[in-house]
Amino acid sequence: MKRILTLLCTLAVLPCFSPAAENAGKPNIIFILADDLGLDGLSCYGSDVRKTPNIDKLAASGTRFEQCYSAPLCGPSRCVLMTGRYAFRTGGIGNGSWRNGGPGAKSADEQPMARLLKQAGYSTGESGKWRQVGETPRDWGFDEYCTDPTAGGWYWKDSYEKNGETVTTPKEEYNPDIIQAFSLDFINRHKEHPFFLYYSMHLVHGPILRTPDSAADAGKDTDFYNDNIAYMDKQVGALVAEVDKLGLREKTLIIFSGDNGTALNHPRTIGGRMINGKKASMQEGGSRVPLIASWPGVTPAGKVNKDLINFTDMHATFLELAGAKAPEGFKFDSVSIAPQLRGEKGAPREWVYVQLGARWYVRNQGWKLNEKGELFDMSDAPFVEKPVEAAADTEASKAARTRLTAVLAELNPAAGKNDPSGEKDEKPRKKKKKKMQK
C-alpha cells in the first residue's frame, strides 16, 4: 500500500503533456490576401484616392511593412507563398504553368506551409481564390476549404465549391459573402485550439462588378472599383471584429497583403505620383505589395518597418510562430520575420528575388539587377527606376552590380524549372464536380 501511495504522489506532480498544453502559446494565424491590390489601393500607404478605414485601423494596431515583394501575377505569388521557395525551384512561374504537363509545382514535391502547420497541431482552412496553384487545397494541407472553379472575378454566381463538392444555390449570390461566411464559421468552430486560415479574397480582381452595397440605380457603365475597394475593406473590418468578439484578438496574428500590383487601368497616385509599373510588369508596381501585421501585445502598434521581405518569408515565419520545424535537407528560400513582428531587429534580408516566366530580378535596398544584366538605381522607388549603364558606373553602382551579379549567379534561375508559357492565362478551368444542393 505504501508503494502505491508513493507512486500516486509521484504521478500527481508530473507535468501534463495533453494536446491542449502542447498547443498553449501557439497563436492563431489569419493570412488575408487581397487580389490585384497594390500599394496605391490603401489609404494607409498614402493612396490619394482609395479609402480603406478598416485596414488603416488594422495597420495602426500593428506594424506596416513598406517593402514586401510578391510575384507580379496571381498564380506565381500563391505558389511562392505556399511553398516558401522561388519559382524556378518549383516550376510555379506562371498562372497556367502547372497544367498541361508543365513544370508547375506539385504538392507531393513540396513542403507546403499548411501541411506543416497541420502536423504542428493546427486546424487549417482555405477560403477564396485557389485554382492557379493547382490540385486542391486539401492536397496542399488544408483540412477544409471553400473556393470556386474559376480564376478570378467570380462574384455573382449560383454555385461554389466546398470541400471538393459543388454547392448550388437557389439564385445568384455574391461569392465574397459566401467566402466571408465560411471564414467566420471556420474561426468560430476552431476557436478552442490553434488554427491557420488562409483567406484569399477575390476582391479586387476584374471584372469589376457591382457589390451588394452599390447603388441600386447604378447603370451598367458605372465604375464600381471604389465600391469593390470599400467592400473589401468592410469585410476585413468584420473579420477583425469577429475575432475580437470571440476574445481571440491577443491570441491571433492577422496579416493582410496583396498578391501583386494593381491591375489594368486602376492604378492611382500616392502623394501625387504614380508607382512605376502595375500587375504583370517587372517594375515595382508589379510586385511591391502591402503587408500589415497585427497581433496586439506582440506587434508594436503604429510601427513602420522598411526591411526587405519576400513572399517566401511567410512560410518560415508561420512555422516559427507555430513551433514547427521545416524538414531538413529540403531547400527553402524563406527567412522568418517573426522577430520583426515582435518589434525586434531580427536578421533582415539583404536582397529579394522576383520571377515571372523567363524574366527575373534581384533587388537590394538601393539597386535592382535583372536577367539581362540591366542595373537600375532604386533610390526613388517605387516611383522611378533609373537605368544605369555599366560605362556610367559610379563606385556605388559598380559595387551593387558586382554584388547582385554574384547573387544571381549563385541562384542560377536559368537552370531551374523554367518555361515562358502561361504567364497571362487566367481563363476558367472546366472541371466536373459532384453537385449537392445548399
Image (cartoon, rainbow, N blue to C red):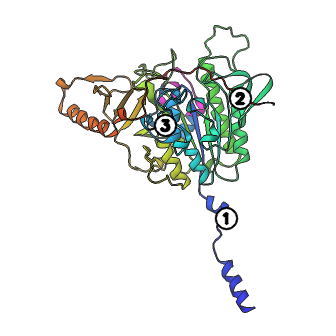
Tell me which label, 3 or 2, sits earlier in the chain: 3
* Element type at mark 2: helix
Residue under the image location 69 percent in, 32 percent down: 179
Seen from the viewer's position, the closer of residues 408 and 126 is: 408
Residues at marks 2 and 1, CA–CA distance in whole angstroms: 37 Å
Q: Which residues are magenta?
A: 40-55
Q: Which mark is residue 267?
A: none
What amino acid does circle 2 point to?
A: Asp
Tell me which label, 1 or 3, sits earlier in the chain: 1
Seen from the viewer's position, the closer of residues 431 and 331 is: 431
Seen from the viewer's position, the closer of residues 209 and 431 is: 431
In the rendered structure, the answer to whether residue 238 lies left or right of residue 303 reads: right
Q: Residues within 10 Å of mark 1 (few under 14, many from 20)?
A: few
377 lies above or below 409: above
Residue 83: where, in percent of width, then height?
50, 41
Q: Which mark is residue 80?
A: 3
Q: Which residue is mark 2?
A: 177
Residues at marks 3 and 2, CA–CA distance in whole angstroms: 27 Å
* Element type at mark 3: helix
Q: Which residue is mark 1?
A: 18
